[in-house]
Image: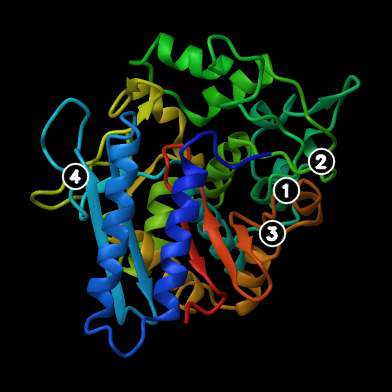
Amino acid sequence: MKLDHSRHLPTLAAIAFSALLSACGGGGSSAPDPSAQLAAQLQSIADAAVKSDSSVPSVLLAASVKGDSVAASVAAGVRAPGTTDPARATDQIHVASVGKMFTAATVLRLAEDAKLSLDDSIARYLPTSIVQGLLVLNGVDRSSEITVRQLLSHTSGLPDYFFDGAPVDDRSPFLNVLLADTQRRWSAEDTIAWAKANLKAIDAPGNTFHYADTNYQLLGPVVQRVTGASLESAARSLVFDPLGMTSTYMEYTEAPRRGADVALTHYLLGATDVTGLPALSADWAGGGWATTSADLIRFMRGLFGGKLFKSPSTLAQMTTATAQSIAADTPYGLGLTSWGNATTPAFGHQGFFLVPSYTIGPTMS
């Protein structure tokens, strides 16, 4: 199953990936300023993306190569559809499922601190009201078999509340519900209850890879139960603050964290501008984060540069694709997917609102 649900993302990701590979190869010694050369490449990509598709209001691209010695960030288009206010490279973006990396990293840090075990049943951390009836097969409730690791790797067998179900008017049942009442605020418990009432289990726990936001909506309450704090607070203390990610926050539950002349670029569902609509609170742990391209680079560099996890084995678990995801032709570990090949691997995540984020190579060289 694809990790994104957008017809634009694969093209943008492929072009940006090629540009970054070219930059990594480094122009010859004749290139006077590699960063300027990289910026020109990225700007060309961003400009072309906006010009080629009127449904894309803005594109922000950033790349960092060789320990930040070569780095660039660019923007094209406008901050909001129907305006002339240009998007800026320092603006914030709603990262959608790219934010699953943040949630996963928070869970893994808690595992390092022995606050939880990845192979524990989720019933150890969540109340019966949430767990009961999550996954019923042939009349048997097998919800307590689901582990924290299976949530992280999308092998729980749970359906995706956001996109599963028979579409109506080219939208999933949940998206139709969301757009029917854009002022409703959703809790994790609300989205989980909706999935229980409206969707069927995919498979028994551990059998199949099926990408589902439901998994991460369950991880949020797990984090809150073991820390006694909100998911946002836990992520800030365990991930964001150590990596200097000062512009990252959870929309709808936290105040925006931005300086002067920085805006949140608008994001759309089809032709509908959903920026700031309370109903998008349904994203939460599965993709409700807002951040900047600079903070995304800080996260990826910290993740792969040894600044976040205490043990290399934690990153190894995160980057190792499960057998189930490989069988589904979607290599996915614990909150990270992979592209490329054994010689030039790439790790990261994609998001619904046209946001790919990845790094080339396991050492960020």
Residue at mark 4 to residue at mark 1: CA–CA distance: 38 Å
Q: Are marks 3 and 2 in contact (CB under 8 Å)?
A: no
Q: Is residue 99 visible?
A: no
* N-term mark: 3 or 1: 3
- Residue under circle 2? 205
Taking the spot 13% from the left edge, 29% from the top edge, the residue there is 83
- Residue under circle 1? 150
Q: Residue furthest bottom?
A: 29
Question: Would residue 140 appear left or right of 313 to someone viewing this image?
Answer: right
Residue at mark 2 to residue at mark 1: CA–CA distance: 7 Å
Q: Compared with residue 46, is residue 23 higher up or lower down, i.e. above or below?
A: below
* Mark 2 residue element: loop
Q: Which mark identifies residue 117?
A: 3
Taking the spot 27% from the left edge, 72% from the top edge, the residue there is 37
Residue at mark 3 to residue at mark 1: CA–CA distance: 12 Å
Which is nearer the eye, 260 or 360? Answer: 360
Q: How many marks?
A: 4
Q: Amino acid at mark 3?
A: Ser
* Mark 3 residue element: loop
- Residue under circle 4? 87
